[in-house]
Image (cartoon, helix red, strand yellow):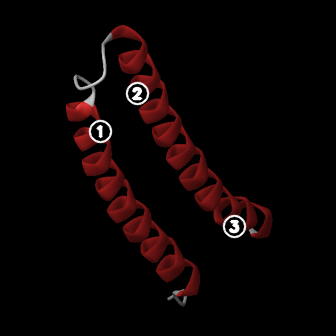
Amino acid sequence: MMPIEIVSHLARPLSLSVRLFGNIMGEDLVLAIVLMLVPFLVPLPVFVLMIFTSAIQTLVFVMLSMIYIQLAMAEAH
């Protein structure tokens, strides 16, 4: 049981960090593609969408971190 529990505790932060990296990289790729395809003022809605999704990502990251920490500190019954 101990090796499974160790892997479980290590997989949570790893999956959270990979998820956050993927979302940030996806936003940067979308912005780069839009900037290459259109002139100056057209990407402004994309910037607004990026700010909105960044706020959502922050909320999700904080909530998942709190849940993972709570689960790690919980006593077994």
The amino acid marked with disc number 1 is: Phe
In the figure, 35 relative to 71: above or below? above
Q: Position of residue 65 (x, y in %)?
A: 48, 70
Residue under numbered circle 3: 5
Marks 3 and 1, how far apart at CA:
41 Å
For discs 3 and 2, the disc positioned in front in the rendered view: 2
The amino acid marked with disc number 2 is: Leu
Marks 2 and 1, how far apart at CA:
8 Å
Residue farthest top in this picture = 37
The amino acid marked with disc number 3 is: Glu
At a point 53% along the width and 35% down the height, the residue shown is 25
Element carrying mark 3: helix
In the figure, 56 relative to 28: above or below? below
Residue under numbered circle 1: 47
Marks 3 and 2, how far apart at CA:
40 Å
For discs 3 and 1, the disc positioned in front in the rendered view: 1
The disc, 3 or 2, on the residue closer to the chain's N-terminal end is 3
Q: Is 3 on the left-hand or right-hand side of 73?
A: right
